[in-house]
């Protein structure tokens, strides 16, 4: 009997999968479970577009992430499905825009003061409907050993959504009682030693899972709580960053230690993968759930931060790495979305799409493996029928009281249009010429604004997107005006003091 080398088999299977994906969005050919690669999804929380070295941070240190990015393909115009945690994560898991899964905000209650909200918000839901099939469920059904380490935020129990193992995941959106113990109501973390840093523990749990699963095909969703608030530094790293000269872009010491803790853990995970000879057969997808936390980081030249629908709130770092399969050292500026991960992961695993569930993304697999492949022209959409109260620093949000009010967004090519439902105001930007969204072209280019607006309206009809229209009886125009004036006066004073 002729023996065929395992390496040749892996390359042959990957080649067949690539041939089956000549068109973007077409699912790959089915493979035997033993031929499928391991999948490591690293998903950070509130990690900004420029918070890592490979995207230009001048203070935060991410050598392990930088190395992985260099070995894979980086997407410079990558987007989260929403500007804050829960809806973005629901988009990632479902492969659907917010109107389909109806998780619009963190929680379903109104945000901000009632007298400042002109409309009644659309509450939506705070739990991912069990009828929605997640990509972890698809992988699990195909024979993958699956695990979640860290933040879940979409229900009480992530094991109902395709995970064999859960460490730390619950409905909570913040680290349980911070980054040092105790960690109440966090599965698998009740035995944490008093000096153990949460990020380190999750990385260690990831290493244990990979070692235990080395003889089978696995998927690990490593979804760190870092760098979500509270900003609690890793103690051993504080002195290092206190003595380091501040960068022009970044200088927050606690944030720097939190980011390095993540990166150190990724280094340990990669050493384990290499030691077990799994590197060539492990795909890594990396990103963040939304823009960075405004008071501690900066996404310049992007405008905005977490919670805003300017670029700084929704554009995120992203790369995909698979040695020998995904093109290394490449940067792609085609706009892509985390909604694309669902069909991409199906293609990576050789699984067909299901006719039972709508997916709003397209597979990135062809362009990841063939530099000549491009995505067909399409629009990306965001829909936020709610409110999100503002930060104390207000320079990069639309108004002083809210990071965002109810809105819809479309990006098509270089163009981006905002619509704000309270007033009907439109903001139009050409991101190629004005990445910082500083010059609103809606009045000077009404035809382009109308074209994009009509495309957004048609999309809302297709997805049954709810648009808030009922006046809030508690709204008080005088109270709103006074609050805006007070915030602006305080901000001006702080600016003078700086």
Image (cartoon, helix red, strand yellow):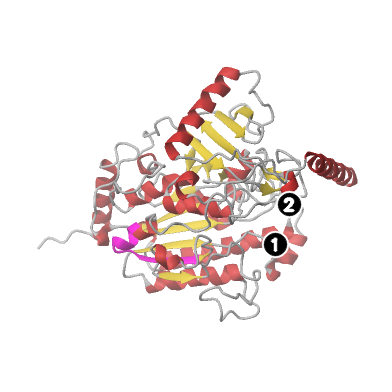
Whole-percent x, y for residue 252 in the image: 73, 55
Q: Point out which mark residue 295 bears.
A: 2
Measure the C-alpha gap from mark 1 to mark 2.
Answer: 10 Å
**Front-lying residue, 318 or 245:** 318
For the point 56% across and 74% down, the residue is 185
Whole-percent x, y for residue 403 in the image: 69, 45
In the image, residue 58 above or below residue 432: below
Magenta segment: 138-149
**Front-lying residue, 296 or 155:** 155
Whole-percent x, y for residue 196 in the image: 62, 76
- Tell me which corner region of the image, top left, top right, bottom left or bottom right, holds residue 472: top right
For the point 24% across and 46% down, the residue is 16
Tag 1 near tag 2, CB within 8 Å: no
Quickly name the residue at label 1: 231
The N terminus lies in quadrant: bottom left
**Front-lying residue, 270 or 232:** 232
Q: Is 198 on the left-hand or right-hand side of 142? A: right
């Amino acid at each position: 009997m002729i023996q065929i080398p395992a390496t040749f088999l892996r390359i042959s299977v990957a080649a067949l999968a690539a041939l089956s994906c000549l068109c973007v969005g077409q699912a790959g050919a089915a493979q035997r479970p033993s031929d499928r690669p391991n999948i490591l999804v690293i998903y950070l929380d509130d990690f900004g577009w420029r918070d890592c070295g490979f995207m230009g941070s001048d203070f935060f240190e991410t050598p392990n992430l930088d190395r992985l990015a260099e070995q894979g393909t980086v997407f410079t115009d990558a987007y989260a499905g929403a500007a804050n945690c829960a809806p973005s994560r629901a988009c990632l898991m479902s492969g659907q825009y917010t109107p389909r899964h109806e998780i619009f905000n963190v929680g379903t209650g109104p945000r901000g003061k009632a007298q400042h909200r002109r409309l009644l918000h659309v509450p939506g839901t705070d739990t991912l409907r069990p009828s929605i099939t997640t990509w972890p469920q698809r992988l699990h059904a195909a024979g993958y050993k699956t695990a979640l380490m860290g933040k879940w935020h979409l229900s009480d129990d992530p094991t109902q959504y395709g995970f064999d193992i859960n460490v730390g995941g619950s409905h909570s959106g913040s680290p349980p009682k911070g980054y040092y113990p105790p960690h109440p109501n966090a599965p698998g973390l009740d035995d944490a030693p008093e000096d153990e840093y949460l990020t380190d523990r999750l990385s260690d749990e990831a290493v244990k899972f990979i070692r235990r699963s080395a003889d089978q095909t696995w998927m690990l969703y490593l979804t760190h709580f870092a760098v979500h608030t509270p900003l609690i530094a890793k103690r051993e790293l504080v002195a290092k960053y206190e003595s380091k000269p501040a960068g022009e872009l970044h200088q927050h010491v606690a944030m720097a230690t939190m980011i390095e803790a993540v990166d150190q853990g990724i280094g340990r995970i990669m050493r384990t993968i290499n030691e077990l000879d799994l590197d060539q057969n492990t795909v890594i997808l990396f990103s963040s759930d939304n823009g960075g936390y405004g008071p501690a980081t900066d996404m310049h030249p992007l405008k905005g931060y977490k919670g805003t629908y300017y670029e700084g709130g929704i554009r995120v770092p992203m790369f995909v790495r698979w040695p020998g399969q995904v093109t290394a050292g490449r940067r792609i500026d085609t706009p892509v979305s985390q909604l694309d991960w669902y069909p991409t992961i199906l293609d990576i695993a050789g699984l067909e799409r299901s006719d039972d569930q709508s997916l709003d993304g397209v597979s990135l697999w062809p362009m990841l493996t063939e530099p000549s492949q491009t995505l067909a022209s399409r629009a990306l959409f965001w829909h936020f029928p709610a409110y999100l109260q503002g930060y104390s620093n207000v320079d990069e949000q639309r108004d002083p009281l809210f990071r965002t009010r109810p809105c819809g967004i479309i990006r098509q090519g270089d163009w981006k249009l905002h619509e704000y439902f309270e007033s009907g105001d439109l903001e139009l930007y050409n991101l190629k010429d004005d990445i910082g969204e500083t010059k609103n072209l809606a009045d000077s280019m009404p035809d382009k604004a109308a074209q994009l607006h009509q495309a957004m309206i048609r999309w809302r009809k297709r997805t049954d997107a709810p648009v808030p229209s009922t006046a809030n009886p508690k709204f008080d125009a005088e109270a709103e005006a006074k609050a805006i004036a007070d915030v602006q006066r305080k901000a001006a004073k702080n600016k003078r003091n700086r």
